[in-house]
Amino acid sequence: MQIRRNKKEKLLRIFASEENLNKNIHKIYLMLAISLGTILAIGMPFFNEPDGVYHFVNSANIANLTVDVSAYGETDQWFGDQFAAQRPNRQDGTFFQKYFKNEVQLMNQKNLPRLQTTPGKTSFRYWSAIIPAIGVWVGYHIYPSMGVMIVVARLVNMFLLSLGMFFIIKYVQKGKLFFILSVLNPVTLNLFASLSNDGLSVVLVSWMSALAINMIVENKLQKSKLIWMIIVSAVIAFAAKTNFLLLLLVIPLLLLVFLSNGRLEKRWQDLTLVLKIVLLGVTFALVAVASYIVLGRFGGAGHIIYRWLINIFYQFTNSTFSIFTSSLTVPLGNFNTPMPIWLSAAWALILALVALSEEKFVKHSLISWGSLAIFMMNLLGLYLIFMNDFTSGRNGELGSIGGIQGRYITPLFLMVFIFISDSRFRLK
């Protein structure tokens, strides 16, 4: 009883004041992440992550444990109904017998469908899946069944990624609560508690963003942080989704601002109103011409923006194709469709309120607007890449795109946080 009372008093002290809460908020995150992640890792249906079958086979290949998934009734179908083979076993009560007691049959990689062999060691598909591969190896040596391999790999992936975020949240000087909410939403929790390689991308992007935020808070170029940013950039290039290479633009952006010692913004402020209007007009014209040339083959800038806005704000029949819902609350569109759109709106509102409640720490508008530009380039670039995938019928005409693209967008919400944290941004 005395031990329980001491623990309760310790928790009360953490929540007793805002200062204590800020000092201990990373601990609160870790408790929530591990608790929720464990529930999901054990309770979620197998292959609940996007391309779930692929991620399991890829992780097993890297661990040199190529599994014949057809022995469990699975196919090489990476998309569509990934739960079809599990459903009858859950209904008749034979799920545990089939997936946990039935030992795996190892096979030669050459016999795998779709030539799915181990990716080369220079590929991000190898390094991004190295943590789930470790989990698969551990699970196999506990008991060689697919169920044990998947659950143990999920737990290992969830624990290590959550631990990584714990240290990042502890390290970052501003925006701790925003960091927490950006990884405790249903989409990111699902990625952490699965074999998806997208979870590692979230951690790497968060690490890079934390380094940038701390340098911005100090308001000066720091060699140690710059070296770390270069190292993390190299890791992102090897172990994160290709679109996150856009985040590397943060380095020249910070160099431009801090090496010029703010002179660029001062010169802009010294310009007359007429000259500012002329320069903005010329810039707008150049952007319009470039947009016409680049986006012409997609139907023009107006058509793209029209479809893009509909995609963000419209709830399609198949919520896989909505950027808005798949970024926050819909991990696997076809099967999470019943999740109401107001839940995504609630998460977006919470993130906005937290971002607006934080102390403004960005003193250079070039940094804040540059961060927003990185986010928007990623959002628009992804839409252009995927707009011609699975867009037939009415949804395609309206603006739906193929695949679950939220996992490519959610980590870069931290760039929007930097934008909102501009000291000249008065809304609070």
Image (cartoon, rainbow, N blue to C red):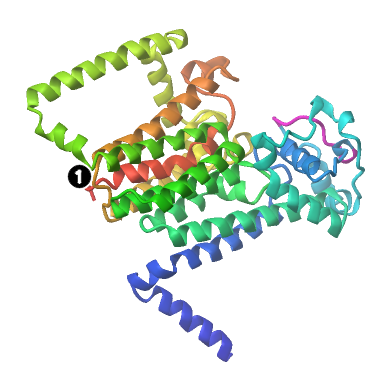
Confirm whether the magenta stretch covers residue 372: no
Percent x, y for residue 106?
91, 42
Q: What is the secondary structure assignment of the residue under circle 1? A: loop
Crowdedness near tag 1: few (<14), some (14–19) or many (≥20) residues, C-alpha within 10 Å = some
User: Which residue is labeled 1 in the image?
Assistant: 424
Which residue shows up at 81% across the image and 26% down it?
115
- The residue sitting at the bottom extreme is 2
Looking at this view, is 200 or 105 the one in front? Answer: 200
Percent x, y for residue 343?
47, 45
Identify the image quadrant of residue 49.
top right
Identify the image quadrant of residue 81.
top right
Looking at this view, is 20 or 401 the one in front? Answer: 20
Q: State whether residue 227 is above or below residue 391.
A: below
Confirm whether the magenta stretch covers residue 77: yes
User: What is the count of numbered marks?
Assistant: 1
Which residue shows up at 83% across the image and 27% down it?
113
Percent x, y for residue 396?
53, 18
Q: State whether residue 270 is above or below residue 292.
A: below
Q: Which amino acid type is shown beneath numbered disc 1?
A: Arg
The secondary structure that most of the magenta stretch takes on is loop
In magenta, the rendered stretch is 71-80
